[in-house]
Image (tube, rainbow, N blue to C red):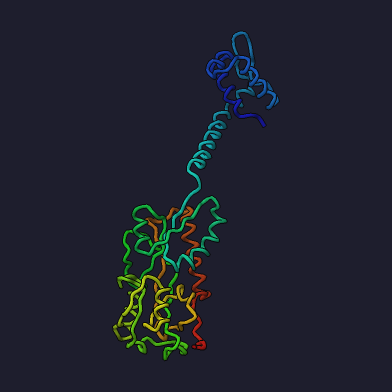
């Protein structure tokens, strides 16, 4: 193996026609140029230059080496530039905006599989509800956002590419002493006269639309007494006997011990969790890998029903 830097010296001697002329161009002494050529000849095991009073010219071996020299030096330069760009830019970064239940139940499983595939890519989680997540996509503050949609309805989020991840079934959440708390499943018409607690301050998010659609399909318009920003608060209000609710499985999986969580009888409402990006991820990119892994986690959740709450009645205090 030879030092490729000496190829540059050989190139300059061949171009200039003498050691002294090459030394002037390279800002070396003539002696230093001679030493570099001699070292290169020792490395390759043959004479590369014929030196004489009129200058220096390549031997057949020198000519052959010079044929490769430009490609070798160009490749070295390109490698140095590529490495420098990595050092300058630092590791790749993917920013994922997510609401709480998806961040807790879906993202960790995907990220555990993502890290071995892209060890130099940092993933940053941003706490954001779907509306804020899509806004971050639009202004460049996020590369992906976990959103919710209503199955069968057009998405409220335009201008993004949404890939379905998981259809998240809703469960009835009742106070522990409710008349239906011991039932294996609860038919929504049986709750038509109840006071309801929903998880949206505005009443317009996909989760709330799923709730209203389910009630209408059951033949009634719900009486909503409380709206909360998160499902933990919803369950707290239900535990205090202030109403009943519908809670998606990802949130119901961490149900309090002082509420009864029961499956809906008959047609079961669900929200669709999707991952949104500003544009389709490039094939083979880290973002494309992450999107595919999120879909894989959703498929496993659906197959295993890991976050389905058992429908069997439990003892109620």
In the rendered image, the vertical position of residue 65 relative to residue 162, given as above or below = above
Q: Position of residue 92 (x, y in %)?
A: 48, 49
Asked whether, in this view, residue 234 is left or right of residue 43, the answer is left
Name which quarter of the figure residue 80 lies in: top right
Asked whether, in this view, residue 289 is left or right of residue 269, the answer is right
Name which quarter of the figure residue 224 lies in: bottom left
Q: Quadrant of the N terminus?
A: top right
In the rendered image, the vertical position of residue 197 relative to residue 86, given as above or below = below
Asked whether, in this view, residue 34 is left or right of residue 218, the answer is right
Q: Position of residue 102 (x, y in %)?
A: 45, 67
Q: Position of residue 283 (x, y in %)?
A: 46, 54
Name which quarter of the figure residue 76 lies in: top right
Residue furthest to the top in view is 53
Identified at 51% across, 63% down, the residue is: 108
Return the residue nearer the eye: 90 or 66.
Answer: 90
Residue furthest to the bottom in view is 179
Q: Position of residue 245 (x, y in %)?
A: 38, 80
Return the residue nearer the eye: 312 or 301.
Answer: 312
Return the residue nearer the eye: 92 or 314.
Answer: 314
Tell how many labels.
0
Identified at 51% across, 87% down, the residue is: 314
Return the residue nearer the eye: 57 or 184.
Answer: 184
């Amino acid at each position: 193996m030879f030092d490729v830097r000496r190829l540059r010296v050989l190139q300059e001697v061949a171009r200039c026609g003498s050691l002294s002329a090459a030394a002037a161009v390279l800002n070396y002494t003539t002696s230093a140029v001679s030493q570099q050529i001699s070292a290169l000849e020792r490395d390759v095991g043959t004479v590369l230059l014929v030196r004489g009073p009129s200058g220096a010219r390549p031997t057949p071996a020198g000519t052959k080496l010079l044929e490769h020299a430009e490609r070798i030096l160009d490749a070295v330069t390109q490698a140095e530039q590529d490495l420098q760009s990595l050092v300058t830019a630092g590791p790749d970064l993917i920013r994922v905006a997510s609401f709480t239940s998806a961040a807790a139940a879906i993202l960790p499983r995907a990220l555990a599989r993502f890290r071995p595939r892209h060890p130099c890519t940092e993933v940053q989680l941003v706490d954001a509800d779907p509306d804020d997540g899509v806004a971050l996509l639009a202004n460049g503050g996020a590369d992906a956002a976990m959103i919710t949609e209503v199955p069968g309805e057009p998405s409220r989020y335009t201008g993004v590419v949404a890939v379905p991840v998981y259809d998240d079934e809703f469960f009835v959440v009742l106070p522990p002493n409710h008349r239906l708390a011991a039932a294996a499943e609860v038919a929504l018409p049986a709750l038509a006269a109840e006071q309801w607690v929903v998880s949206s301050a505005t009443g317009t998010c996909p989760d709330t639309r799923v709730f209203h659609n389910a009630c209408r399909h059951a033949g009634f318009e719900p009486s909503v007494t409380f709206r909360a920003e998160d499902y933990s608060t919803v369950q707290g209000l239900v535990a205090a006997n202030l109403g009943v609710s519908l809670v998606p499985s990802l949130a119901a999986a961490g149900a309090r011990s002082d509420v009864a969580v029961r499956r809906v009888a008959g047609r079961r409402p669900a929200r669709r969790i999707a991952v949104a990006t500003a544009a389709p991820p490039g094939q083979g990119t880290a973002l494309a890998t992450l999107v595919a892994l999120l879909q894989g986690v959703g498929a496993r959740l659906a197959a295993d029903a890991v976050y389905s709450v058992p429908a069997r009645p439990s003892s109620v205090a």
